[in-house]
Image (cartoon, grey):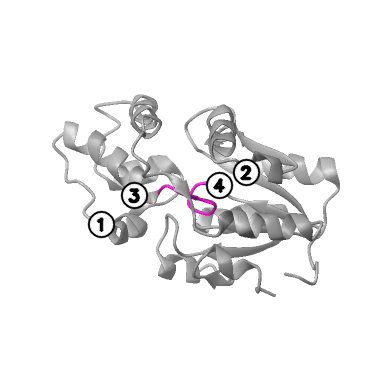
Amino acid sequence: MNNQKYSHIIWDWNGTLLDDTKWCIKSANIVLKKRGLPIIQSISEYRKMFCFPIMKFYERLGLDFSQEPFEELAKEYIRHYHSNKSGDIHLHKNAKTVLDYFKKQGISQVVLSASEQSNLLSQANEFEVADYFDEILGLSNIYAKSKIDIGLDYMSRKNITNAILIGDTDHDHQVAKALGIDCVLISNGHQDREILKNCGVPVLNDISCIIKYG
């Protein structure tokens, strides 16, 4: 993308820039163990099961909303997720290098995430990347339902026509389609490569491949 084909890059956060898959598995397994449910055994298993909406993912894990409301389960999961002090959450290797490259190219960069806004801002500041982004856009709650409306509002406010969305799930592809923009997916995040390939857009191995893409 060094030919500046795009004026804006819209980044997903979790799994795309932030490498938190292992910690998400650990957090989910705490919730599952507490209820005597089978735990997630591997990253491969997790990536095959993970999906949006998050409610569907919880159901795949065996959580029963007739016994406990989704909202309460989500709160418990998020509490465990944000208790991380072990270093299991960090930026993907070369993430800062890629962000710095596009900043020097003069390409506007934003984050569009299904994470709750204050948590998102906290992580972006913690990992010292907030300054790379013109805007950091998250949801107003922790339930990770969709980010399409936030993206549409951003596109309208900025009158953007030549953007690309970079993510790690088929939901990111759905968001890009709703926004009417191109999409590239990265396969070392939260979802299995075969699932991503079904989206019919380029699937790259890791974030460092983005610079040479296109």
**Relative image position of residue 139 (x, y in whole percent):** 59, 33
Q: Which residue is mark 4?
A: 13
Q: Amino acid at mark 4?
A: Trp
- Per the model, the C-alpha gap separating discs 1 and 2 is 29 Å
Q: Nearer the viewer, mark 1 or mark 3?
A: 3
Which contiguous range is marked in magenta? 14-20
Amino acid at the residue labelled 3: Lys
Q: Residue at x 65, y 73 (%)?
A: 213
| Mark 1 vs mark 2: in front | 2
Q: Which residue is mark 1?
A: 42
Magenta-highlighted stretch: main secondary structure?
A: loop
Q: Residue at x 65, y 39 (%)?
A: 130
Q: CA distance from mark 1 to mark 3?
A: 9 Å
Q: Earlier in the sequence, mark 3 or mark 2?
A: 3
- Name the side, left or right, on which 170 lies relative to 211: left
Give the structural element (helix, strand or loop) at label 3: helix
Residue 40 located left or right of residue 166: left
What's the residue type where badge 1 is placed? Ser
Q: What residue is pinned by disc 2? A: 129
